[in-house]
């Protein structure tokens, strides 16, 4: 196998170096058999050679080998179609992502006042992520206070849910990094005690707390 790969590399190297396909004779003709040719087809992405295909075949002469090489170039055409489709899909994904960001930014920027903007942020995040609840906490005097809940205009700051949310947020704030708790055990490698308690109280849902920074 190693010898075959080495031979393949030696065959295609001149074609890659020159940037063009080639029909290379690799075995002479016998009394009853035609000579052997290696048909090398270069595959490109955005004009750059990224791969090569090589087919060993017997042909009557070099002219016939060149004719077969032309038909082999259909492979390059299929590869171009594949790369175009993949590029198009990637561009579509990026466009959708940018659209989500713009819509999210608009929902926050056009709101009247902080409370309305916070509410819009939580609602948009819940809708786009499929989360059962999104909450926003604000740091005040080294403590975190819940300021907004998705799909909830008013809430009692003393209710157990709010207290648990604030504890989970403070756990994230103290560590200054994302805290993620998953009931199946795939949690982040940091302290997740409060996140775990919140998860159990909310039907064993996944819990993720993300620190938001200024500057």
Image: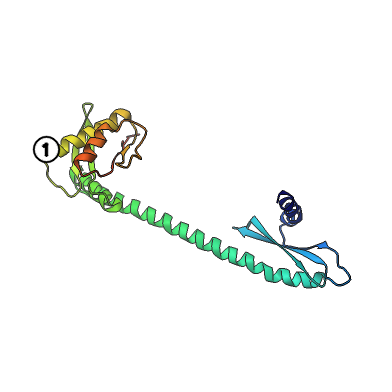
Question: Is 7 above or below relative to 139?
Answer: below
Q: Nearer the viewer, residue 179 or 88?
A: 179
Q: Residue at x 22, y 38 (%)?
A: 198
Q: Is 113 positioned to the left or the right of 41 in the image?
A: left
Q: Residues within 10 Å of mark 1 (few under 14, many from 20)?
A: few
Question: Is 57 above or below relative to 99?
Answer: below
Q: Which residue is mark 1?
A: 159
Q: Number of marks in the image? A: 1
Q: Residue at x 31, y 54 (%)?
A: 103
Q: Nearer the viewer, residue 100 or 65?
A: 65
Q: Residue at x 42, y 54 (%)?
A: 94
Q: Is 67 positioned to the left or the right of 211 in the image?
A: right
Identify the colour scheme used.
rainbow
Residue 67: which quarter of the image?
bottom right
Dot 1 falls on a residue whose secondary structure is loop
Q: Is 122 positioned to the left or the right of 95 in the image?
A: left
Q: Position of residue 160 (x, y in %)?
A: 13, 37
Q: Nearer the viewer, residue 68 or 7?
A: 7
- Quick one: which residue is furthest to the top in this view? 141
Q: Position of residue 10 (x, y in %)?
A: 76, 52
Q: Position of residue 214 (x, y in %)?
A: 32, 34
């Amino acid at each position: 196998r190693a010898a075959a790969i080495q031979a393949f590399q030696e065959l295609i190297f001149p074609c890659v170096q020159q940037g063009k396909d080639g029909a290379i004779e690799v075995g002479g003709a016998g009394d009853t058999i035609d000579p052997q040719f290696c048909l090398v087809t270069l595959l490109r992405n955005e004009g750059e050679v990224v791969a090569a295909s090589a087919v060993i075949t017997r042909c009557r002469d070099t002219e016939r080998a060149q004719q077969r090489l032309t038909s082999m170039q259909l492979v390059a055409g299929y590869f171009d179609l594949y790369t175009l489709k993949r590029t198009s899909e990637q561009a579509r994904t990026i466009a959708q992502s940018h659209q989500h960001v713009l819509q999210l930014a608009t929902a926050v920027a056009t709101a009247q006042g902080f409370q309305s903007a916070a509410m819009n942020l939580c609602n948009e995040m819940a809708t786009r992520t499929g989360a059962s609840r999104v909450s926003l906490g604000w740091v005040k005097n080294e403590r975190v206070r819940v300021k907004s809940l998705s799909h909830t205009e008013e809430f009692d700051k003393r209710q157990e849910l709010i207290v648990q949310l604030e504890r989970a947020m403070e756990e994230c704030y103290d560590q200054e990094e994302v805290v993620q708790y998953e009931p199946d055990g795939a949690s982040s490698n940091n302290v997740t005690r409060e996140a775990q308690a919140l998860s159990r109280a909310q039907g064993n849902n996944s819990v993720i707390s993300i620190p938001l920074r200024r500057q």
